[in-house]
Amino acid sequence: MSRNAATLTGFTAILLWSTLALATSATGAVPPFLLTALTFAIGGSVGLLAGLMRGVGLGVFRQPWPVWLHGVGGLFGYHFFYFSALKLAPPAEAGLIAYLWPLLIVLLSAFLPGERLRVAHVAGALMGLAGTIVLLGARAGGLGFSPDYLPGYAAAGVCAVVWSVYSVASRRFESVPTEVVAGFCLATAVLSVPCHLLFEPAIWPNGAHEWLAVLALGIGPVGIAFYTWDIGMKRGDIRLLGVASYAAPVLSTLLLIAAGFAAASWSLALACALIVGGAAVATLLARR
């Protein structure tokens, strides 16, 4: 697969993640770790079946322990610290800190062999971060960081570091087939079960529409997205994908507006301008 094709494949993960908010809202009151266990079980099963249909045997999962530490640590670690942050701090502030991961991906890519980090990449990522600040700040009616929520802020920071390191380090495991991500997903589902039992009530999906929403999450944003992101990180333009990741919260808001769950605003327009401008800066100026 060419670099451009892998980058476009990685973009599909960003598009799928933009549907998370809308799809999650349709799952009702299902608590986070239970939802993680259900959706990752579905996503892992989809990848496993797809691999078997293509003739990829179960032997593909015989990988060295660093591969499993990287994959399971990335997927489960991100979700564990993200949900912990949301419990310990206001969602807007926790979400903003957690969404430092695209900027960190751009910065960490400088340590990869053959990659050159340019000022335009950093400028584009900072513009995307500014757009996210505008968007999340407008949703919450303003951002107010308080020392009372330091544990939550710390968990959100760890969450951002875990996902950015997982993403960039995927290039180090380029020889590992993407089919192995199915094993990472299934392991994440298993690890989420004790977290659910320890930290939250058992509220299962209610009715066919909520189960369909869980199924859709497991197939798309939690399933296919992680496979396409793996391809993009291993073979695509990491810096451009990092900058483009800031489009996910804007696209998510646009979908919520289209579905009637949110209203259009000038802050959304400004966030769009900043994020699109950041992507243009990172793409056009960096190539020049």
Image (cartoon, grey):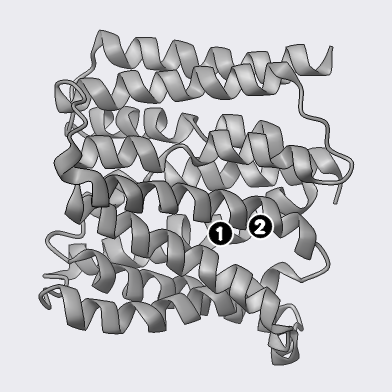
- In front here: 68 or 25? 68
Residue 8 in view (yes/no):
yes
Q: Which residue is tagged 2?
A: 230
Q: Residue at horizontal 51%, vertical 41%?
A: 101
Corner quadrant of residue 177:
bottom right
> Few, some or many C-alpha atoms within 10 Å of disc 2 (few <14, some 14-19, many ≥20)?
many
- Looking at the rendered structure, the kind of residue marked 1 is Phe
Q: Is residue 30 above or below residue 133?
A: below
Q: Are marks 2 and 1 in contact (CB under 8 Å)?
A: yes
User: Where is residue 164 drawn, in percent x and y?
Assistant: 57, 48
277 is higher (above) or lower (below) than 47: above
- Give me the disc on residue 226: 1
Q: Give the CA distance from mark 2 to mark 1.
A: 6 Å
Residue displayed at 83% across by 31% down? 116
> Which of the 4 image quadrants contains residue 192?
bottom left
**How many other residues sit within 10 Å of disc 1, few (<14), some (14-19) or many (≥20)?**
many
Q: Identify the element where label 1 is drawn.
A: helix
Give the answer, above or below, for where 160 lies relative to 227.
Answer: above
Locate residue 34: give its quadrant: bottom left
> As rendered, which of 213 and 166 lies closer to the eye?
166
Which residue occupies 49% across, 65% down?
75
For mark 2, give the secondary structure.
helix
* x, y percent for residue 79: 38, 61
Residue 8 location (% of width, % of height): 69, 40
In the displayed structure image, the side of residue 4 where residue 178 appears, left or right: left
Amino acid found under the numbered disc labelled 2: Asp
In the figure, 65 relative to 47: above or below? below
